[in-house]
Amino acid sequence: MRDGVLLWVTEEDQARAQLATLMVHDLDQHGFAQITCHLESRTPPNSHADYVNYFKLQPITSFPDTEAVARVSTGTQGRSLPSVFTLYKRESMAIDREKVNFITLTVVCSDNGVPQSHETRKTVYVKIKDINDNPPVVGGIDSSHLAGAPFVTQTIHVLENQPFGTLVGTVSATDADEGINAQLLYTFLSQSELTNASLSKEDMLLNGQGLFELEPTTGNLFTHVPLDREMNSSFSTYVRVSDQGSPPLSSTVLLHILVKDVNDSPPHFVSSAGTNGRIIFVVNESIGKSRVHGRLIGQLSASDADEGPNANVHYELVEDSLVPKGLAVVYRVTTKGKIYADGVMDREQSREHQFTVRAVDGAPKGQQLSASAVVIVQLKDINDSPPHFLSPRPKQDGSIASDLINITVNVLPGTVLYRIHVTDLDESENTQLRFVLRSAKFLSNFFALRSYPSPVSESN
């Protein structure tokens, strides 16, 4: 026997297989040349099986010997003939290469010398030949398998707005076989293949395949176009992972691609209808010249199409934006969007107050986006202004306005004697004026008042 012999056994083979024929001889003569051989094995690492029982060393001799003992008679010249053994793998003893890929056997042969026998050893290396008996296994940190589902689910993430050719992630799969049986190919499942597969209608998700490219030999997934999370925040598709054995085995993975947000959408104000983007609040003016303190004017509202902190909106007043200038009122805006007023809100001074507000998202400083809007506060009239005489002209000392009317005895009835002019700073519904004559009872039978445009006064 030469040093070290390499033999091959096909895995999972149940049949009895002849592996090698061994010839052993002893140079001694007569009874000292009777040779006995048996097998020993080294247990492979991480294995608890004694694989020596999988093999048998069978002597080729006319004497049946189940213990692999060969007794060969000496020749006519006084020399012994070689002892011959056949090494078999036993029937029904299948070996799984994925558990052990080689077995080391030692053939131990000894003579029957007296008082001391001699022993020799020979190492036999049995390599297990792979067959394609393992499909690809999809795994990874973001992989899961639902009980009863014909596929594994894997989730990968990608930032939106990335350029063409950006690596999204890798479909992770392994194959316990070796060689060509472990070389994997990755392909998208088409709609027709999904229809023919054992998938329910709920499972037959297929969107976005045209947006991605799958590298067939690595499982790397790349973008075809920049992705917009605000239009579509996730995609789902099926990938088949096949080995190149004969016949090939495959597994299916349902790939979820989640698009991660980038702060690319500014806030958007909710404006009043038909105002060209302006925000209008209508409130009552303050009564007379009285001041208001912390009066709630209204609530701003803005939305942001981003998500997470990028969608958190806070509000602020744009400094020095209040018009008209010089108003006796101050507006303030809280970060939550509430508008408050402090001061005199006098409609007779200005019926509309206008200022600018800003909505800012919650991205880190330097990455924040904002939007501005014009707020108009319209003051509703309260009847807080008395009528004011223009004619007769008021006196500077504040006494009652008066004038002198001269007439003759020849004035005809219906003649206009005097026109009284009065103004009121309130709105029209609060300026319907009524005139009466006071402290002139003795004149009531001779004079009358009429509203404009009829003559204001006539004689009787």
Image (tube, rainbow, N blue to C red):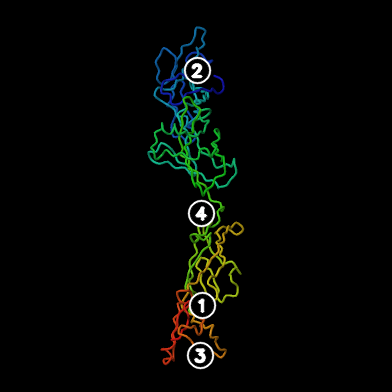
Give me the C-alpha separation between circle 4 and circle 1. Answer: 51 Å
Does residue 276 appear left or right of residue 64 in this picture?
right
Residue at position x 45%, y 74% from top? 429
Residue 237 placed where, x, y %? 47, 39
As helix, strand or loop, the secondary structure at mark 4 comes to loop
- Tell me which label, 3 or 4, sits earlier in the chain: 4
Q: Is residue 120 above or below residue 262?
A: above
**Eyeballing the image, is 202 above or below 16?**
below
Report the disc number at residue 425: 1
Classify 10 Å Cα crowding around label 4: few (below 14), some (14-19), many (20 and above).
Answer: some
From the image, state whether disc 2 or disc 3 is nearer to you: 3
Q: Earlier in the sequence, mark 4 or mark 1?
A: 4
Q: Amino acid at mark 1?
A: Leu
- Quadrant position of the C terminus in the picture: bottom left
* Residue 427 sits above or below residue 263 on the image: below
Q: CA distance from mark 3 to mark 4?
A: 87 Å
Classed neighbour count for the residue bearing mark 2: other residues with Cα under 10 Å, few (<14), some (14–19), many (≥20): some
Q: Amino acid at mark 2?
A: Leu
Q: Which residue is mark 4?
A: 307
Q: Which residue is mark 2?
A: 22
Numbered mark located on residue 408 in the image: 3
Outermost top residue: 76
Marks 2 and 3, the one that precedes in the sequence = 2
Residues packed near mark 3 inside 10 Å, few (<14), some (14 to 19) or many (20 plus): few
Which amino acid, mark 3?
Thr
* Front residue (pair 427, 328): 427
Identify the residue shown where x is 56% and y is 89%.
395
Callout 1 environment at 10 Å: few (<14), some (14 to 19), or many (20+)?
some
Give whichever of discs 2 and 1 has the lower sequence position: 2
**Mark 2 and mark 3: Cα distance apart in space:** 162 Å
Three-letter amino acid code at disc 4? Glu
Query: Looking at the image, is mark 3 or mark 4 nearer the viewer?
Result: 3
